[in-house]
Image (cartoon, rainbow, N blue to C red):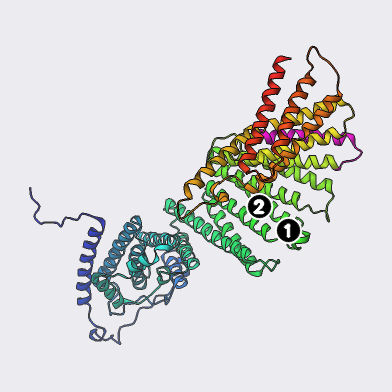
Amino acid sequence: LQPSCAFPVCHGTEERCRLVLNYVLEGLKSVDSSVKKESDLPAADPSTPIPLKYEDESTSGGPECLEKQMALFLDKMGSFQKGKHSSQSGMIPGSWQYKMKLQLILKSSKAYYVLSDAAMVLQKYGRALRYIKLALQCHDTYCCLCASMLPEVLVFLCQCLTLCGDIQLMLAQNANNRAAYLEEYNYQTKEDQEILHSLHRESRCQVFAWATDLSTDLECQLSVSCKCYEAAYEILLFSNLKNQNPEQHIQVLKRMGNIRNEIGVFYMNQAAAVQTERVGNKNVSTTEQQLWKKSFSCFEEGIQNFESIADATNAALLLCNTGRLMRICAQAHCAAEGDFKREFSPEEALYYNKAIDYYLKALRSLGKRDVHPAVWDSVNWELSTTYFTMATLQQDYAPLSRKAQEQIEKEVSEAMLKSLKYCDVETVSARQPLCQYRAATIHHRLASMYHSCLRNQVGDEHLRKQHRILADLHYSKAVRLFQLLKDASCEFLRVQLERVAFAEFQMASQNSSAGKLKTLFGALDIMAKTKGAFQLIRQELVAESEQVSKDKSSAESISLHDSSAGLNKEELLKLLSIFESRIFLLLQSIKLLTSTKKKLGGITEEEVALKTNKQVYSLLLRATAERSVPLLERVEVILSLLEQLTADTEGAEGGV
């Protein structure tokens, strides 16, 4: 059977909403034309008493209480005049025109809301703001006409404000397209204009006008977004609707937490920028301190929002951001005493320890890694970084004016070990190479510290032995971790050279030739094990040389320094010079071996080693005679010497 009347076919959300608005407009026109002008209305009968509504205190807490709360809320939101619930067109409250117009206004508001939501999905944020502005303008008129609102109308108003907050946040995060959004925002159809004209016949209230301006200021947009969510939350509170709408209550609180995080990050970044610009003046500025307070306040409120809905993951993220803020505060207090007398200050220690407290709270909020592995790993990394930074600063800028050297060494060691605790080198992830590099650097720094302690320690033999064992242990761990990394050849080389220096220092305190020879061979073995690092360095230099040759013909050539992402030429040249100087340990071995006459059979171990070392030393003298040898050639010479040294040693060991 065919329907008795034909319905229009709509192909999309916007088309359906536009059809609804077209019918609404026709209805509004009909209602407006039926309303008599105020001058045509009959005069009041003087013999008929005017009914006065007195408030009964016994009924407080009912609809009248809600009405009062709504009036206070509207007055707080914008230019709403309490008690002014009358129509400017002369429409009589309770009449069919009044009731019909309220329904039509509400329907138009819902249609505009749907249009705004659809525009949000399409990322047309200017259009979305225009539609939600129209929806809230409908609500403005509705609020001015109607003193008491139904719960479903209040819930819908809450949804409108929440969507408006979302739009303002998206506009803030996509500032690059502001021109396009402005064009969308300013566009208006004739139909929209006529609906607005009908609304303005009744009232020109602008309760929510603050929420729908398209600002060019990022701080203002974030602030407006936050105020929208706060207004939505306030409606749910005073109307007691949060229990009937638990999902909406959770979503509003989640958005409040999120926007407060965004504002907190905004102020934190501003503080960091001010700190960067503060070059000449070493003192922390008042502007920085105010920005810190604003940022901290926003993070604190956001954490409370997330904790109130048991959102542990987001609460942990905000605690992590608060920790980052504390680190910025710590950085702002560095070098306050002048560059010539830089010491790790008590203020730096205070803020770094505060940062650590917030990171630990974030881990407690999560409870275990399974809750959110990515966030858990991120917090652990930031915690490790904070301990590492604090330990490094205390080691490099030791506060010797306030603490004893032994106390500083103890605190550095404790902080470095805690950094290692939260540095996960085992889990396979994109961050794993960073963790391995961090762990290797920590072991290297600890080894260097104990090495230095051993050099400066006098008297206590037990403590010297302990430092010797710890230095050797951490050097070994650093070497093992740097070997796992493909782009840490220079770091590996530096550690091995320090190990050689450590062996030389030990050898200086040895009396017997056998003991010295054993230590010396250990040092030469350490140097021989750098062959793999030099092979990687050669590969990088060859690749770099080929790249430069290709680019010679092009207009945009690549410099030697920039063409290699991981190779520091200046650092490499320093290490290479030190390495070449340490190969002269061969001369010491030759002298010691020559003076040693102990035989083990037909051929002595010493004679095999002596022959090998003499050959390599002779080649080394010839290779280093000319100082103007290019870097690549110097590396290749060292590689050939190391290959011969290891090959001859292995051959001799096999024949003995």
Q: Which residues are magenta?
A: 456-480
Image position, residue 3 (x, y; %)? 10, 52
Q: Residue at x 79, y 17 (%)?
A: 604
Q: Judge by depth and name the residue closer to the eye, 537 or 581.
A: 581
Per the image, the residue denoted by label 2 is 355
Q: Which mark is residue 347?
A: 1
| Above or below 461: residue 378 | below
Amino acid found under the numbered disc labelled 2: Ala
Q: Residue at x 70, y 66 (%)?
A: 282
Secondary structure of the residue carrying numbered label 2: helix
Q: For this view, does 252 lie left or right of residue 203?
A: right
Q: Residue at x 19, y 56 (%)?
A: 10
Image position, residue 286 (x, y; %)? 66, 69
Q: Residue at x 76, y 20 (%)?
A: 608
Residue 224 belongs to magenta span: no
Amino acid found under the numbered disc labelled 1: Glu
* Mark before the other along the chain sequence, 1 or 2: 1
Q: Quadrant of residue 632?
A: top right
